[in-house]
Amino acid sequence: MATQDDDSNGKAADRIKDSAQQIWLAGLGAFAKMQQEGSKAFEALVRDGAGMQKKTQQAAEETLAQAQQRMAGFASEFGTKAAGQWGKLENIFEERVARAMEKLGAPSAADMAALQARVEALEAQLKKTQQGTATATAARKTAARKAAAPAAKKTLRRSKAG
């Protein structure tokens, strides 16, 4: 029986040795094949890497564009809200200044507008009066010249006769 166990152990050892030898040879074959095709594999890896870089860069650019659009929307919304608040603040300020000016007795914008309209009306009336006065003065001067002309002729005649 001991021989049978030794034979079985020997066959198992041979099988393991043969299997190890085959694994070793497969590894050497893979190594040799990689040495022969290494440059091709390297070039394939470079192409794959470049393709992956393009994909990730494109995805990053799309994400950036979306983020920029969102930020532009936020900025626009913020600007609109801020403008509305500034408008309200401006109105409050104007109202308070107007009340303070009124308490001090200063004329309001409406008072100033009415005063301006009154000044313009008075200027127009004065201009008409001046034009009428100038016309009347010119008419009087013309009448005075006409009246003075015969008297001057008589004076000339008398001085020649004398």
Image: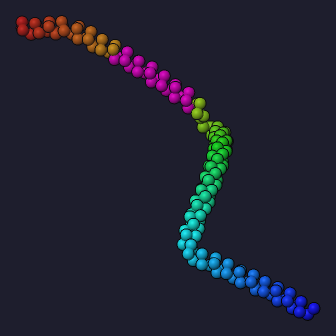
Can you give x and y, in whole percent of width and height, for residue 64 in the image?
62, 55
Q: Is residue 104 above or below residue 64?
A: above
Residue at 56%, 75% in the rendered image: 36
Q: Where's the C terminus, which quadrant?
A: top left
Specify whether 133 is left or right of 74. Answer: left
Q: Does the magenta segment cover residue 114?
A: yes
Q: Nearer the viewer, residue 36 or 39?
A: 36
Q: Does the magenta segment cover residue 48?
A: no
Q: Is residue 105 above or below residue 140?
A: below
Q: Nearer the viewer, residue 5 or 149?
A: 5
Residue at 48%, 22% in the rendered image: 121
- What is the total number of numbered labels drawn onto the structure image? 0
Specify whether 157 is left or right of 53. Answer: left
Which quadrant would residue 94 be assigned to in this image? top right
Can you give x and y, in whole percent of width and height, for residue 119 in the image?
49, 26
Give the magenta part as a residue range: 112-134
Q: Is residue 29 above or below residue 48?
A: below
